[in-house]
Image (cartoon, coloured by chain):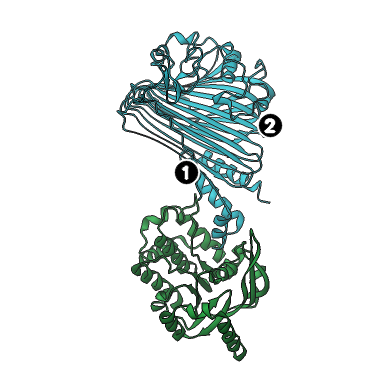
Chain colours: A cyan, B green
Amino acid sequence: MTDITTEKARIGAPSSQPFINGFTEEGESLSPLNAAESKSPLAGEAVKAHSHGGGVGIPDSSRAGRLTSYKLADFKPLTGMEEDWRFTPLKRLKGLHTEVLTGTGPSVAVTAPDSVRVETVGRNDARIGSAGIPEDRVSANAWENFSEATVITVPAEVETESEVSVVLTGQGTQAAAQHVVIVAEKFSKAVVVLDHQGTAVVSENVEIVVEDGAQLTVISLQEWNDDAVHASSQQARIGRDAKFKHIVVSLGGDLVRVTPSARFTAPGAEVELLGLYFADAGQHLEQRLFVDHGVPNCKSNVLYKGALQGRNAHTVWVGDVLIRKEAEGTDTYEANRNLVLTDGARADSVPNLEIETGLIAGAGHASATGRFDDEHLFYLMARGIPEDVARRLVVRGFLNEIIQQIKVPAIEERLTAAVERELAATNH
Amino acid sequence: MSTLEIKDLHVSIDTEQGTKEILKGVSLTIKTGETHAIMGPNGSGKSTLASTVAGHPRYNVTSGTITLDGEDVLAMSVDQRARAGVFLAMQYPVEVPGVSMTNFLRTAKTAIDGEAPSLRHWTKDVKAAMAQLRIDADFTQRNVNEGFSGGEKKRVEILQLELFKPKFAILDETDSGLDVDALKVVSEGVNRAHAEGNMGTLLITHYTRILRYIKPEFVHVFVDGKVVEEGGPELADRLEEEGYDRYVQGAGAATIAAADAAAQA
């Protein structure tokens, strides 16, 4: 495997070199005002009404400085030059960033064990805003325009015997908003599957609350039709000693942009953010994640794997991990692996690690993009393996590392079959 | 009894400077049970011959034939050749991302045999073969050749040779880069496979060292894309002492000698 390794580190430790006031070697530094504000996971109580997380004029050179607000008007219209939009073809967003999202959102069908509460609530429900705050214009647009939300609650100490299945079926190409809240109360244990299907143009906010001692797995499947456009901000707030596993699987859709984040609010918690994507000709699959270590002694592990094939298949992975000054004893690792199967595909991969304290257990990041090339194929075929089987073998093996983490047999089988279908699509 | 027959094979490759002929009329016949050594200096076309028989797309056959028991090997795809019984132990085995050794070995065996091996016997066979080649058991969990040392890669090639039981094994400089211990282990593997009596072996090597462990009945000296001299094991001994200098310096004379030999044959 010929690896093209791209690594980019941002280490926020103060430089011993003399520097211009207010600047680090990476650029403009955070204002003291912002640093004080950003201690709380949602950047303080006050910001719920209105916030410019980074303050006016602070560029997003640090992830901590990014603007967060519930109000669409606080976000400037997108130009495509913004750091967090620079890889996204805005023209293909079909209005998610410009239009009022009044279309009919995907229908929501929940199948859950009796012990789980499923509600449809209005905008004023107290749980809205408990874990999430928009970090970009498209997310804020959905927040401003959603009319009702689905709230799924796993009550305290309940351990569900089967997964909670949430099937979201697109209702057409009118730009729409969606809102889902998942709450895993104290010491509960559950698996929630968000299953996105059909045709939709939708901006979605998913808020995830993982209370103290809870163990929650959220799997977000994007098996949209070819014409779907989906932006999904999935923000999790992690309580003390909680365990949160988040798995993004993006296979279908014209443009899918998932932005998961995990914020630790108390010590002793662990998160695993996993992802799998398979882009075909013309597809844009983007994932930008954020792990915010703001408290001591938490662990995070990130692994995203992607396969690409066909002309103009484009994948983007940006992994931001921030270890704040307070987050002593943090242990974190993030990695992205891409497998390029044909010419004409493009994988962008940017792991960012910001470390504001040296008192950590570990911090690492890695990225490798490799090609499945003719020499691999020759080797396998020289052992009697036909070409189509050889390709399948490689891709299945590569992506299996993520699939086997899902641990819901029916979904594992479905995804294995879906990956085979993706491969079969270009076997001629 | 099978026969692999190479007749007047001409092979060229495309380079930036244009087409370059590498093999300039090679003829060779190997039968089941025979071991042939092809020896020659660097750049003489030994490895090209090996890769061409296996069907590597880089090499264009411009004329000549390769047949296996009369079947046209050149008309077969790479995987068909392997299933027909041709095995190439590669000089530089590639690392294949994402595929575990276990999965790879079983898939290949299934493809070659046309049916999946019985799981119980297969696992046992793999374990035993690995132990004999002194390959750590945990290699089965690793990806094909990924992170293996040069010596480990060569052992894994011979592991496949022993498990897949081909009709003809072509060993492309399997000995290069091996220390003496590894060379012994690898040679023993080849000898075990050969001793089963259903295989012909074509051993391509730059050095005579491996011939202390694997005994060829026939030795062919390759210079500049042609066989310039053929003989028995004694030819190898002579090469051990004299090296390739006399062929390279007097390539013209050697060519004539080979032509004479061919005329007599």
The amino acid on which the numbered mark 1 sits, given as a three-letter code, is: Glu
**Residue to which mark 1 is pinned:** A401
Q: Is residue B213 left or right of residue B58?
A: left
Q: Residue at x 61, y 56 (%)?
A: A387
Viewer-side residue, B185 vs B84: B185
**Residue to which mark 2 is pinned:** A227
Which percent across, then down, holds residue B132? 36, 67
Q: Could you give the CA–CA distance between mark 2 and mark 1, rounded to whole angstroms? A: 29 Å
Residue B187's image quarter? bottom left
Q: In the rendered image, is residue A283 in sight?
A: yes
Q: Callout 2: few (<14), some (14-19), or many (20+) C-alpha neighbours within 10 Å?
A: some
Q: Chain of mark 1?
A: A
Which percent across, then down, holds residue A370? 52, 46
Q: In the rendered image, is residue B2 in sight?
A: no
Which percent across, then down, holds residue A425? 66, 46
The image shows residue A91, relative to residue B39, as above or below, that is above
The amino acid on which the numbered mark 2 sits, given as a three-letter code, is: Asp
